[in-house]
Image: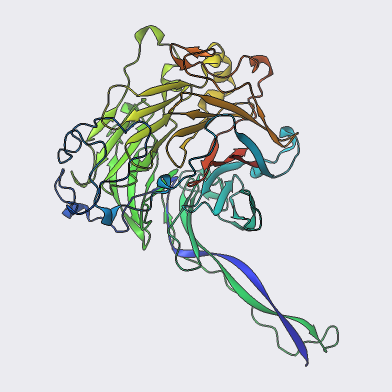
Amino acid sequence: MVATSQTRVNREARLWPVVGRGLALLQSPLSLLIDLATLPTPGCLPHSSPSCPPPIHTHPFGRHANPGPFPASYPPGSSTYPIPHSIVPYSPYLIMDQDASSSGGWRFAQCFGDKGEVEDITEADIISTVEFDSTGNYLATGDKGGRVVLFERNEMKKTCEYKFYTEFQSHEPEFDYLKSLEIEEKINKIKWCKRQNAAHFLLSTNDKTIKLWKVFEKQLRVVSESNLLDGQRSIPGTASPQHLRLPRMERQDNIIAAVPRKETYISADDLRINLWNLDISDRSFNIVDIKPVNMEELTEVITAAEFHPVHCNLFMYSSSKSNIKLADMRDSALCDKHAKMFEEEEDPTNRSFFSEIISSISDVKFSHDGRYILSRDYLNLKIWDINMENRPLKTIPIHDHLRGKLCDLYENDCIFDKFECVWSGDDKHVLTGSYHNYFRIYDCETLNDVVLQADKSAFKAKKIGGPLPGNKAGMKNGRPGGLRENMALETLDFNKKILHASWHPRENTIAIAATNNLFLYSAA
């Protein structure tokens, strides 16, 4: 046989032998599995070297703020925590492009996906999560069909554009015969892990199983020509390959969060939070358990969880009772007692039948320096100072215009929609979504905001009015008063909603999931 060969690059996603049960992924900031039985006592943070320069301070809220004594070892009057440089992870907010427009400079960049009408969209094609990696050069999306799609930055373009990288099936539908429960293949969350050599590692989860994937490129030599006659083969056929079976971590979870150095992560379900190590798939540590002895006494569930971006011992979780709890793993193995609880007292005059539903927190995020917390409930976006528990620094109304339609939203189940929120790379802007494919970018410094629409018919962002200046038209009591007047309630399509988004860690580029389309926008 005479044959010629050619070399081509093949991208492969392989299930790595470390996987876990989960509905949510959350990673802690140090690359180690913490032995909860031998944790240091609370307040004993590592001491920084006297020769270390103070941390660079770029946050809009913290330049002149006095954070107060938290923990007790923090010096009074300091504006940032004295974190030793040896444990400070890479901080993308320090090098973000500062020249990007803070209000009206946003423009449409790209769109991936089918241009069909919402009524024609297959349920499996709806995007359920989107996440940039730590460099911003790669972008991952997951959908309700259990697929993960990766995009790579196009270096041939001067602008921030991406191209298809690879796609693989992450989860398949399952059935729990003990509980008679069908488990969807929907990807609830994706988290990028620390890159090793040329391979990418990422975690994906559905309602039951967390999987760790290794994505890499390899060169294949394929036969392009030969002198064999058609139908002839010189090598006998081999047996059919067996499926590679790898261990999986299985449990009812729907949230995951990882540490910056990405060797440990936490998973959360409605009642528990577990701490995992990427190298150990058959066991985890239960660090939060709110399950009552009698399930009839259940009054709240866990809705979101997040590790502190700097301190590996701190994490927070939110609940359906409109509070956020900050816990310290140095205090005890089971963090049944919180270190802090962030909760705003409700005005009794505003209480209604829907109060508990609309006040349930759907998402929480730490700022990149760990000083502030961003939370989202159905009506509002809130920014909290980690040292002020009784009220948020800022409350940004998002759905004030929907207060009169709560009955209708309850009937069509839209009132239970879970909107995410994100910080910009420099923590100066926040973003969240709304209905009719509207999303809102809020400037924390100037109090301006911009409302954009992901309009796939024109494949460009429609700007609804101009930016809202502080304490001018469109403000209520010194705060922006929701969406614009020309967003008439009668014309809003509640089937079109922006639930998921991600912000580039170094640039003013955002990725927006709009049903089955992925939109990219950038600011000059």
Quarter of the image with the N terminus is bottom right
185 lies left or right of 295: right
Looking at the image, can residue 253 be seen? no
Q: Residue 368: x and y, percent? A: 38, 42
Residue 333 percent location from the top left of the image: 21, 47
Q: How is the image coloured?
A: rainbow
Taking 240 as reference, is 407 above or below it? above
Taking the view exactly as shown, the residue that stands out farthest to the top is: 349
The extreme bottom residue here reads: 1
The answer to which image quadrant residue 516 occupies is top right
Considering depth in this image, is 420 or 187 the residue closer to the camera?
420
Residue 13 placement (x, y as % from top left): 56, 63
Identified at 63% across, 15% down, the residue is 489
Q: Quadrant of residue 308?
A: top left
- Residue at the spot x=45%, y=47% of the render? 178
Q: Is any part of residue 130 visible from this angle? A: yes
Task: Note whether 434 is above or below 198 in the view shown.
Answer: above
The residue sitting at the front extreme is 99
Q: Nearer the viewer, residue 104 or 322?
A: 104
Q: Quadrant of the C terminus?
A: top right
In this rendering, the count of numbered labels is 0
Using residue 372 as the reference point, say whether residue 134 is left or right of it: right
Q: Residue at x 60, y 42 (%)?
A: 127
Q: Is residue 198 above or below residue 426?
A: below
- Left or right: where does residue 460 sit relative to residue 229? left
Q: Foreground residue, 425 or 415? A: 425
Q: Quadrant of residue 231?
A: bottom right
User: Which residue shows up at 45% across the image and 62% down it?
Assistant: 195
Whole-percent x, y for residue 196 in the image: 44, 66
